[in-house]
Amino acid sequence: MKNKIHGKKIFSIIFLLFALYQPPLGAQTLSPAAEVSIITFGPGREELYAAFGHSAIRVQDPLNGFDVAYNYGTFDFNQPHFYLNFARGYMIYMLSVEDFGRMQAYYRYYHRSITEQVLRLTPAQKQKVFDYLQHNARPENASYYYDYFYDNCATKIGDVFRLALADEFRFDSSFVDEPGLTIRTLTDRYTAAYFPWGKLGIDLCLGLPMDKQLSNMEYTFLPDYVFKAFAKASIKINGRWQPVVREVRQLYIPPESKEKKPWLTPHLVFWSFFVVIGLLSLYAYRRHKSLRWFDFIWFFTLGLLGVFLLLLWLATNHKAAAWNLNLLWAWPSHLVISFLLLKRKLPRWVNWYLLFTAIVGVILMLAWPWLPQALNTALIPLVLLTVMRSLFTIVQE
């Protein structure tokens, strides 16, 4: 199993190196045989980032001898200050031009579906799209500031056709079956089953902007909805509006997945942890013993988490991290209180602080279903644990 994982990582690295190579396209005028397509790659199970699928634009011209994919989902680890920019939320992605055969081989290797929507475009319209992509792929134009939900490798696909074809192309927003959903609801559908820890991380780090109801076109931050949007889009040819998709081709249908859902979920781990600490707390109370070292570690950890969430909100450009209601239970002030909890005799005001912590925790539990931010239910035992340890500490004083 380890060798298999190691081999996949090596394959991914090699593919990324090839992705940064832009094949020469030769002639800049497309032949009459050229086709422009939307490629939708299905969700993957190998990494969290793969869970949402991927989109690209394919341009193939057999007479001019090229078949390439335009991929807006490329980033370069070697760009200046990459890790600092990533931490601050200034993620620079770029448009790369890749050999479609190699790209297709990569997704086949990971058993991810590949669907092609061949577009009904006139030669002039194909040329406009191609020219736009070629201009956009130049080194001086290729980079852009990436946003998880509003400017990513999927949303860019629609932008290309809107900008290149202007009033000759239009979307029909009725492609959405369930209008008015939130970003969090949609991302949950891709992460909850196979990436419960990834879902927890998203729910923990990203705040109220994730719970904004989306307009129909905003659904296209997900590749599956890019596919649906183009399925209902129209193109004007000879003064008449027609469906832009001429043909749908299934280039690869993966075998039925045998991968099992993870059993070690946040709910199992956190509720088990709560039960163990609850039993230890009862034992310590009856024996008149202290769990001050656990309380120190616990409140110190909560405080660190609170500081991290606050910095994500106020000190970075991660817009989706703003107004995070997880700060209602992960208080940065716990970082200071944790050191005072090591004392044998607590200052009186610390007891009042712990009582306030417990009261806020109980109110949060009661209000949980009605909060404007959908907090992850796996966090409930952690909030209850904070309430429990706050009360036990007060009672044992």
Image: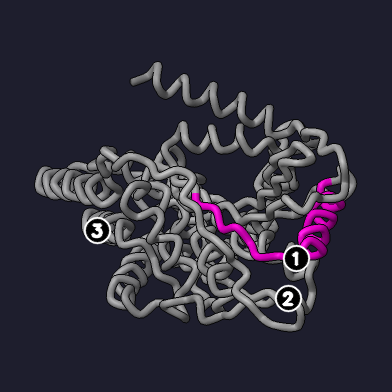
Q: Residue at x 44, y 49 (%)?
A: 43
Q: Residue at x 46, y 31 (%)?
A: 109
Q: Residues within 10 Å of mark 2 (few under 14, many from 20)?
A: some
Q: Residues within 10 Å of mark 3 (few under 14, many from 20)?
A: some
Element type at mark 1:
loop
**Mark 3 and mark 1 in contact (Cβ < 8 Å)?**
no
Q: Residue at x 41, y 78 (%)?
A: 178
Element type at mark 3:
helix
Q: Which residue is mark 1?
A: 122
Amino acid type at image mark 1: Thr
Quarter of the figure with residue 232: bottom right
Foreground disc of the pair 1, 3? 1
Counting residues from the N terminus, which is met first, the one under dot 1 or under dot 3? 1
Element type at mark 2:
strand
Amino acid type at image mark 2: Ile
Residue 22, image x, y percentages: 77, 35
Q: Which residue is mark 3?
A: 388
In magenta segment, residue 287: no
Q: Left or right of 365: which side holds 297?
A: right
Residue 326, image x, y percentages: 45, 63
Q: Residue at x 72, y 47 (%)?
A: 93
Residue interval drawn in magenta: 115-137
Quarter of the figure with residue 102: top right
Counting residues from the N terminus, which is met first, the one under dot 1 or under dot 2? 1
In magenta segment, residue 125: yes
Overall secondary structure of the magenta stretch?
Answer: helix
Whether 112 is drawn above or below 128: the answer is: above
Q: Which residue is mark 2?
A: 237
Residue 132, image x, y percentages: 83, 57
